[in-house]
Each structure stands twice: as structure tokens, then as C-alpha cells.
């Protein structure tokens, strides 16, 4: 099992696509173990996007991510990092395949609705920015036996 961070970005919240997007993860059998809505501050933006702070596009990125609330989620599942990123599609909605979240709902590189961690290291770091360990609610799903084999 892996754990990953997913952020429903300001455009997702403003367009009222939160439920639609969350259902895509749940329909896939991924388990949401923490979720909250928050306003990203400039300080949190700089921590989250630390590798981009010195790049010329960073000011517009910060302006966007702090423009409206986001929904942060911790998601568990088999190969969750890859599976979530596959569900999202390519970063640019113009290049994302139909059937992916970005392919179906985005036509922008920056306003692409959702952020997801790209590696286990990023997931660990990013989850720590948005959640305390006590906020993770692990639970056994009654449908687990119908989602995957015991040896998976």
C-alpha cells in the first residue's frame, strides 16, 4: 500500500468539481484517509513548491494556489502514487487523454484542477505539510474483499 497527497486546486473548488473528482478516486477503489479544506498561504505555497520558488513562473503559481481554498486529501491504495497520476492525466489539460480528470475537465497547464505527489519522497514531504499524523483515519473497508485479492 502507498499513501499520496492530492490537492483539489482553487479552480476545482471554484468550478464546484470537488465531488466529481473525489468520486473518480473512490470509484477506482482508492481510500481517502484524511481530507480538509484550507486556504494556502504564501508561506505554505513556498514550502510546497520549494523547487520552483526561484523560477520565473513561480509568482503566478503562488498567486493561483493562494487565490481560493483547496481541498487536501491523503489517499491510500495499491500503487496509489502511479494510479492517482494516471487518473489525473498529463499536466496540461490540452495534452491529457480523454477519460482522465484533466483530459475531461481542463484546458490549461496551470489551471489543471488537481495536484498529486509524484514520488514516495514527495508524498511523505507534502503530506507532512498538510496533515499531522493524528489526522490520518485508517479503517478497514467492508468492500475490500471485492476490490483486490488477498495477495495483492
Image (tube, rainbow, N blue to C red):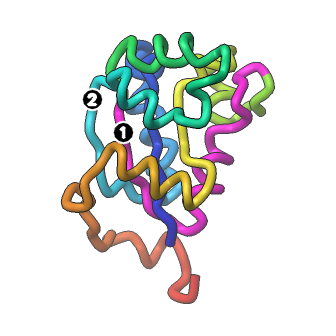
Residue 66 is left or right of residue 21, and the answer is left
**Disc 1 target residue:** 72
Callout 2 environment at 10 Å: few (<14), some (14 to 19), or many (20+)?
Answer: few
In this orientation, does residue 126 appear?
A: yes
Callout 1 environment at 10 Å: few (<14), some (14 to 19), or many (20+)?
Answer: many
* x and y, in percent, of residue 18 in the image: 40, 29
Residue 38 shows which numbered tag? Answer: 2
* x and y, in percent, of residue 62 in the image: 48, 18
Q: As rendered, which of 99 and 85 lies closer to the eye?
A: 85
Residue range of the region highlighted in magenta in the rendering:
71-94
In the image, is residue 77 part of the stretch drawn in magenta? yes
Tell me whether the residue at label 1 lies in contact with that at label 2, contact meaning CB atoms closer than 8 angstroms. Answer: yes
Residue 111 shows which numbered tag? Answer: none
In the image, is residue 97 part of the stretch drawn in magenta? no
Secondary element under disc 2, as helix, strand or loop, is: strand
Distance from Cα at disc 1 to Cα at disc 2: 8 Å
Secondary element under disc 1, as helix, strand or loop, is: strand
Amino acid at each position: 500500500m502507498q499513501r499520496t497527497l492530492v490537492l483539489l486546486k482553487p479552480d476545482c473548488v471554484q468550478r464546484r468539481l470537488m465531488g466529481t473528482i473525489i468520486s473518480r478516486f473512490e470509484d477506482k477503489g482508492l481510500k481517502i484517509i484524511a481530507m480538509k479544506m484550507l486556504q494556502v498561504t504564501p508561506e505554505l505555497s513556498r514550502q510546497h513548491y520549494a523547487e520552483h520558488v526561484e523560477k520565473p513562473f513561480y509568482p503566478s503559481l503562488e498567486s493561483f494556489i493562494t487565490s481560493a481554498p483547496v481541498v487536501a486529501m491523503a489517499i491510500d491504495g495499491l500503487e496509489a502514487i502511479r494510479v492517482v497520476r494516471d487518473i489525473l492525466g498529463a499536466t496540461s489539460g490540452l495534452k491529457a487523454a480523454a477519460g482522465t480528470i484533466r483530459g475531461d475537465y481542463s484546458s490549461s497547464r496551470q489551471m489543471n484542477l488537481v495536484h498529486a505527489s509524484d514520488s514516495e519522497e514527495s508524498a511523505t514531504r507534502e503530506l507532512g505539510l498538510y496533515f499531522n499524523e493524528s489526522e490520518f483515519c485508517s479503517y478497514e473497508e467492508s468492500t475490500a474483499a471485492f476490490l483486490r485479492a488477498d495477495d495483492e
